Each structure stands twice: as C-alpha cells, then as structure tokens.
Image (spheres, helix red, strand yellow):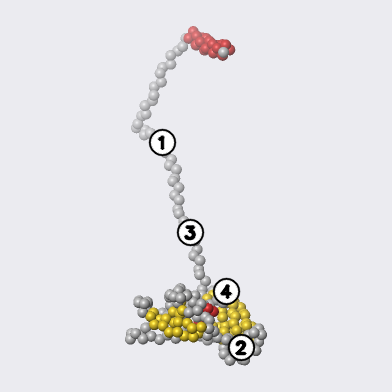
Amino acid sequence: MKISGPGLPREGVPVYDLNGIPGSGNTVPVKEDGSWRFIWYSATIAGGEKIRTARYTITAFDLTNPENTASVTILLKIPDFYINPQQREVTPGDYVQLNGITELGVTELKIDIVDSNGTILRSYTTSVSGSGYFDYGFRADMQPGEYFVSVSNPAMKDVLRTTITVVPHEETPLPAITTSLISTPSESLSVPPTPSPNLTQPVASSPSAIPLSPLTVIAGLIISSYLALVGSTRRRKQ
C-alpha cells in the first residue's frame, strides 16, 4: 500500500511513512482466496506534517507483479486540533518536543505518557497560548518500546493522541586488539670442544734459533742508521 498526492513523491510512499522510499509501500497480508483488508490508523503516520487538506490516492500493488494495481482517491483533512511530535523515534535520554493546536479557551493541558499496557508512566502540564498553540518538551527516560502520548483537558471535546518509539542506543564496537608473541632467538654459545685425553694435538714446530754474531748485529744497526739518514737527507734536499 502506498499513498501519493500533494506534497508527496509522484511514485508514492508507504502509507505509514511519508518520508519513506519513493515507490515503496507497507505490506498487507492476503488470504488464500485472494481477499485482504487494511485499516489505516492515521495517528501513527511518520511524516504526517506533510499532509494537507486535499485529495490523495492510495494504491495497492502486487509485490510480485507491481504492474497489477488498484487505487482509490480519498479526501484528507488536517484536523483543527492536533498534537505533533518533532521526533517519532528517539533513544533513551533524548529530548522529545511536542507541539500542536488545541481548542480555543483552553489555557492548560495535561500530557500523559502511556505504555503498551495502558499504564501512565509520566504526566506533565503545559500552558496554551491565546491562539490555542502549545509547545512542550521532555526527556525520554523510558525503556525502549512504543509509547502513547495523550493531551487532554476537561474542557476539550476530544483527547489528542500520538505515539513515539524509544529505541536502544547503538553499541559502538570496541576496536579489535591483536596481540602477537615475538620470539627472541636465544644467543647460541659455542663451547669449544674439550680435547679428549686419548687424542694428541700436533704442536707446530718453530724454526731453530740461529745465533747471531756480534758483527752481524753491528752491521744491522749501521744499515738501519744509514737508511734513516738517507731518508732524512733526501727530505732536506727536496
């Protein structure tokens, strides 16, 4: 089921979500004989502020064969008195803002927050302007679920009603912590093998010392001195 008309996409939107995807709709169960029945409770429409006093077209189409459609035109009228929640869906602790128009002459309103069992969980009072406009906000400190909001006054003919839904907070996943084991290679100590007592290691033989004569030593000293002097003399000549 989808609805189209003034202020809405030409392709239509779901009858319960006027902010929904254009061309989509809300599903309706079909009986085995092909018959179906749909009751539209307009007080729970998301985006209901888009509705004007005008004619709108409600279209039923087959999900498997979308070209098979049937439609009807209805006249929608903005109520003279209404309540409009600025947020249809909130999380615990969010601020909910309500506003609307009530009957002239009413100076104060009672606002009740009721759960699905009919239990009144919160009650507030707010003043009304001379034109019948009211505006009130409160904290949604209830548990997740659907709640009914009613606005009343003994002087009013009708009770204004709407709904809000409290959804749980989205849990932010914690960043994954990865741990890795780093193996430190142990230092290998090389231990020299202990020689076996049964093995004998060869000992390098040193050449026999040849005794030098005194003349050879003196000649070596004279040559060394001469080389040093020659080197020194050459440096001076340069």
> Tag 4, which secondary structure?
loop
The spot of residue 97 in percent (x, y) is: 59, 77
State which quadrant residue 236 falls in. Answer: top right
Q: Amino acid at mark 3?
A: Ile
- Residue at the image point whose x is 47% and y is 60% from the top: 176
Q: Amino acid at mark 4?
A: Asp
Q: Amino acid at mark 2?
A: Glu
Crowd around label 1: few <14 · some 14–19 · many ≥20 (10 Å)? few
Point out the tag, 2 or 3, that comes first from the N-terminus.
2
Disc number placed over residue 177 in the picture, else none: 3
Point out the tag, 4 or 3, that comes first from the N-terminus.
4
Q: CA distance from mark 4 to mark 3?
A: 32 Å
Left or right, 78 with respect to 206, comes to: right
Q: CA distance from mark 4 to mark 1?
A: 78 Å
Relative height, residue 179 to residue 163 (above, below): above
- Residue at the image point whose x is 52% and y is 12% from the top: 227
The spot of residue 141 in percent (x, y) is: 57, 77
Q: Amino acid at mark 1?
A: Pro
Q: Residue beneath label 4, please?
A: 94
